[in-house]
Image: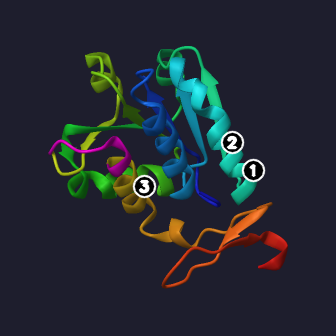
Amino acid sequence: MQGDPEVAVLRLGHRPGRDERITTHVGLTARALGADRVILAGDGASRADTVEDITERFGGPFAVDTVESWRPTLREWEGSVVHLTMYGEEVQTVEGDIREAHRERREPLLVVVGAEKVPFDVYEKTDWNVGVTNQPHSEIASLAVFLDRLFEGRELDREWEDAEKVVVPQAVGKRVVDADEE
């Protein structure tokens, strides 16, 4: 998010025919809730165009990177790594340590979001394995809760640059206008 060290979200895996919407929504959630970029690996790279299209229409900055394999990204990351998993430490227990590493020590942060069964070496490579509720639920929900806790709600007031379209908040109905009308 603007002014903070980089936050990147690595989508680990993608099951074709099953994860098209999920992978897209991981990217859109990362964008909307303060991450600077999403990294889509392997078959997940097929969803890059959709996330890029939303960024073009509704503003940025936000980047979408595609890679053949997630392993080099994880292995070569220079900064802290958080893996979101229902088996991890409770988010409310470790969020302060993660925020300190990110904001105060100015370390880039890689947030790993899985799809299929995550290999054990991911658990070993990360600085924190973080669980949001420790109950089965969506990786999109975990990402949203984690980013909101990381940024302490500041991401909700983010300014969007170069938007073509703007959503106008209202109590009832939908209203999207051209950015120059806003």
Q: Is residue 45 visible?
A: yes
Find the residue positioned furthest to the bottom.
171
Secondary structure beneath dot 3 equals helix
Type of amino acid under label 2: Glu
Q: Residue at x 53, y 42 (%)?
A: 27
| Residue 54 shown left or right of residue 114 in the figure | right
Q: Say what secondary structure mark 1 lies in.
A: helix
| Residue 58 is inside the magenta segment | no
Closer to the camera, 160 or 152? 160
Mark 1 highlights which residue?
A: 56
| Badge 3: residue crowd in 10 Å (few <14, some 14–19, many ≥20) | many
Pointer 3: what residue?
147
Q: Quadrant of the N terminus?
A: bottom right
Indicate how the structure is coloured in the image.
rainbow
Q: Where's residue 147, x and y in %?
A: 42, 55
Q: Residue furthest left?
A: 135
Secondary structure at badge 2 equals: helix
Residue 139: image location, x then y, percent: 33, 42
**Residue at image x 58%, y 32%?**
47
- Assess whether mark 1 and mark 2 are in contact (beta carbons under 8 angstroms): yes
The magenta span reads: 135-141
Q: Of 34 and 5, which appears nearest the observer?
A: 34
Q: Which residue is mark 2?
A: 52
